[in-house]
Structures are given as structure tokens and as C-alpha cells.
């Protein structure tokens, strides 16, 4: 079994309104006898995923593309274990479809690998794997040859550097999240104070309207007069002959 920790560039299409920020995928792979265990972390959404790619699936892809299995497998492994990716390959992580795709782009696009993903809640799991991988490489007994020894030290330092970079990215993301949360709380408190002020103004307006209605009710009976009262004491009108006969 071999393990690899790499960082590759996520395949994306840049629109006119989109900020030119390079999205990366941190990828940890375990190469077992019959399958490949993948752990992926994408920086655009700070989300981790897991997947299992079986060797039989790679064999089926090689047959569909009419390529020798050994050469096809070696090319896939090189593409999935090289830092910053193998030139001529694109790495796509589709979060909506929950799929990871490996494309070979040489004049035209060829789909090499397509595997379903499962979301993982623990974003630090890949960091732990990177640290463990670095420790395992650092404890490996170097070859007697000087060249092989230097290569072993270089290989051991890469996962450690990548783990440190990944850990720093997680810290920066958490710090940015705290800053955004603080701004949101300040905005929420401001809105809350504004709502309380409007409620007080509305209550004062209701009290003022109620006092006005009470004053009107107190004054109105003094000004009310019935029709009989208004006619009492008025000038006497002479009855016509017709009205007198009717009475």
C-alpha cells in the first residue's frame, strides 16, 4: 500500500463577474491491492469528500478507451499523485452531482476517471492523514545511495509542507468565518435597535391618538342639541287656513 497527499487545481470556468481566485483540491489517496481510497477537500466550499475507486472500474475505462490496462493505470496513478497535477489533465469536483472526474485534455477531452463522492463532516480528517503520511515517510529507512537518500528526504518533506499549508488554510478560513459572524452580529444588533425605536414611536403615536379621542368624547355632549330644543323658544309661525282645518 502507498499513500500520497497532493494539491491540484480545480477545473472551473471563469465568468466576467467572477473573481480570479484559483480553487484547489487537496487529495489524499491510498493505493490498495484492489481499490483506491480517496479523500478530497475543495477550497471553494471548505467541504471534504470520500470515494472508493476500484481497480475493476479503471480496467473497464481502459477497455472502453481501447488502451492497455497497465499503461492506463500507470497514467491515472501519475495524474492522481503528482503535486499540482499532471500536465494535460483536468481535475473536476462537481459538488451538485457529488462526483469527481479526471479528464485528459490533448486536443480533445477524454474522461479517464469518474467516481461518486460521499460528503465528510470532519474537515480535519485529511489534515490528520497528511500528518500521518509525513511521519510514515520520515521514519522510512533511506537507501544507502546518496541520491536515493536525498529523494527520500524530499518526498518526506512534501507531505509535511502540504499539511502545514492545509492547516494554515483551515485557520484562515475559521478566522474569516469569525470576522463575518462578528459583522453579522453588529448588523443584527443595529437592526434590532432600529425595530425597538420604531415600536416606541408607534406606541407613542397610539397613546396620542387615544388621548385625542378621549378629549373629543368629553366635548361633544356639550355641543349636542336635539331638534326639539333648537325649535323651542323660536318665533311662532302663523298657521294657514288649510293647516288649521286639518288639525
Image: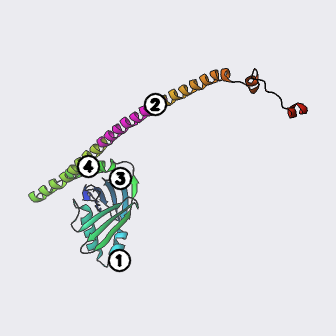
| Residue 139 appears in the figure | no
Mark 2 — residue?
196
Q: Which residue is mark 4?
A: 166
Task: Evaluate if marks 1 and 3 touch, with contact meaning CB atoms under 8 Å apart.
Answer: no
Mark 2 and mark 3: Cα distance apart in space: 42 Å
Give the CA separation, mark 4 to mark 1.
37 Å
- Residue depicted at x 26% and y 49%: 166
Magenta span contains residue 203: no
Q: What is the x, y in percent for residue 56? A: 37, 70
> Disc 3 designates what residue?
48
**What's the CA distance linking mark 4 and mark 3?**
12 Å
Q: Is residue 20 shown above or below 233?
A: below
Dot 2 and dot 3 residues touching (CB under 8 Å): no
Residue under the point 40% across and 57% down = 118
- x and y, in percent, of residue 132 in the image: 27, 49
Q: Nearer the viewer, residue 211 or 149?
A: 211
Report the span colored magenta: 175-199
Task: Confirm whether residue 120 shows in the render.
Answer: yes
SS at badge 1: helix
Of the numbered discs 4 and 3, the one sitting upstream in the chain is 3
Q: CA distance from mark 1 to mark 2?
A: 68 Å
Residue 78 percent location from the top left of the image: 24, 65
Which residue position holds label 1?
64
Give the residue displayed 25% in from the left and 69% down from the top: 75
Spot the residue most to the bottom.
Answer: 66
How crowded pointer 1 is (Cα within 10 Å; few <14, some 14-19, many 20+) is rated as few
Amino acid at each position: 500500500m502507498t499513500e500520497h497527499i497532493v494539491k491540484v487545481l480545480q477545473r472551473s470556468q471563469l465568468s466576467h463577474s467572477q473573481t480570479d481566485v484559483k480553487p484547489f483540491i487537496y487529495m489524499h489517496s491510498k493505493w490498495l491491492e484492489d481499490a483506491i481510497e480517496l479523500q478530497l477537500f475543495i477550497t471553494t466550499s471548505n467541504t471534504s469528500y470520500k470515494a472508493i475507486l476500484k481497480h475493476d472500474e479503471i480496467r473497464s475505462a481502459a477497455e472502453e478507451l481501447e488502451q492497455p490496462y497497465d499503461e492506463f493505470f500507470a497514467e491515472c496513478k501519475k495524474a492522481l499523485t503528482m503535486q499540482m497535477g499532471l500536465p494535460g489533465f483536468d481535475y473536476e469536483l462537481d459538488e451538485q452531482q457529488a462526483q469527481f472526474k479526471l479528464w485528459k485534455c490533448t486536443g480533445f477531452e477524454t474522461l479517464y476517471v469518474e467516481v461518486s463522492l460521499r460528503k465528510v463532516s470532519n474537515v480535519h480528517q485529511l489534515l490528520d492523514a497528511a500528518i500521518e503520511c509525513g511521519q510514515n515517510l520520515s521514519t522510512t529507512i533511506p537507501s544507502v545511495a546518496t541520491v536515493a537518500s536525498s529523494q527520500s528526504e524530499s518526498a518526506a518533506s512534501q507531505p509535511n509542507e502540504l499539511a502545514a499549508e492545509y492547516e494554515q488554510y483551515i485557520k484562515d478560513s475559521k478566522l474569516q468565518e469569525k470576522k463575518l459572524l462578528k459583522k453579522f452580529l453588529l448588523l443584527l444588533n443595529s437592526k434590532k435597535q432600529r425595530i425597538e425605536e420604531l415600536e416606541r414611536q408607534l406606541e407613542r403615536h397610539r397613546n396620542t391618538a387615544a388621548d385625542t379621542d378621549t378629549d373629543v368624547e368629553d366635548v361633544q355632549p356639550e355641543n349636542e342639541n336635539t331638534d326639539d330644543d333648537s325649535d323651542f323658544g323660536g318665533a311662532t309661525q302663523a298657521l294657514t287656513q288649510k293647516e288649521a282645518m286639518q288639525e
